[in-house]
Amino acid sequence: FYTWGYNGYGQLGTGNAVAQSALFKPPGPFQGSVTKAVIGGGISYEGCIFQAGNSLWAAGYCGNGNIGIGASATNNVFIKVYGINGTILD
């Protein structure tokens, strides 16, 4: 699982909010088991949520609980979304 591009809210899991022009492999136990990822938001609020097995992981803007990991300004590393398991639909 690699990320790249705009990272103004830390949604690429790089540990910072700096744009990533080259492929970046975020560290975590999910590596090798990611099956789907969703990046987006709208009105400049970006987040990334991905599925690894039956677990969901997220990073990015979460000031309004946007990505299900509590309310704080941003989260720039991927953390597991606890209490929610499931499948990201196409």
Image (spheres, rainbow, N blue to C red):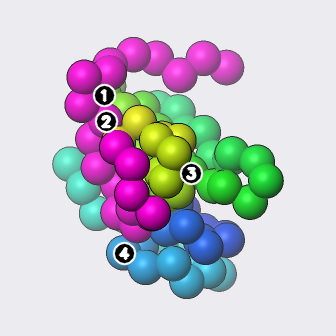
Q: Pick whichever of labels 1 and 3 is earlier in the sequence.
A: 3
Q: Is residue 16 visible?
A: yes
Upstream in sequence: badge 4 or badge 1: 4
Dividing the picture into quadrants, the one containing residue 75 is bottom left
Where is residue 53? Give x, y as percent. Answer: 32, 25
What is the three-letter code of the residue carrying label 1? Ser
Q: Quadrant of the C terminus?
A: top right
The amino acid pointed to by label 4 is: Gly
Give whichever of discs 1 and 2 has the lower sequence position.
1
Please tell me in which quadrant of the rendered image residue 69 appears.
Answer: top left
Q: Amino acid at mark 3?
A: Gly
> Which comes before the other along the chain, label 3 or label 2?
3
Calculate the distance from the C-alpha at mark 4 to the C-alpha at mark 3.
14 Å
Give whichever of discs 4 and 3 has the lower sequence position. Answer: 4
Rendered location of residue 25, percent (x, y): 41, 66
Give the secondary structure at mark 1: strand
Query: Is residue 60 placed above or below 4 in the rendered structure?
Result: above
| Image height of 23 relative to 58, above or below | below
From the image, tell me which residue sits under label 2. Answer: 81
Residue type at tag 2: Val
Label 4 – label 1 distance at C-alpha: 21 Å
Query: Which residues lie in the magenta part?
Result: 70-90
CA gap, disc 1 and disc 3: 17 Å
Q: Secondary structure at mark 2?
A: strand
Q: Secondary structure at mark 4?
A: loop
Q: Residue at the far right: name it.
A: 43
As helix, strand or loop, the secondary structure at mark 3 comes to: strand
Q: Residue at x 59, y 79 (%)?
A: 20
Q: Magenta part mainly helix, strand or loop?
A: strand
**Disc 4 + disc 3, Cβ < 8 Å:** no
Q: Which residue is denoted by mark 4 in the rendering?
A: 15
Contact between marks 1 and 2 (CB within 8 A): the answer is yes
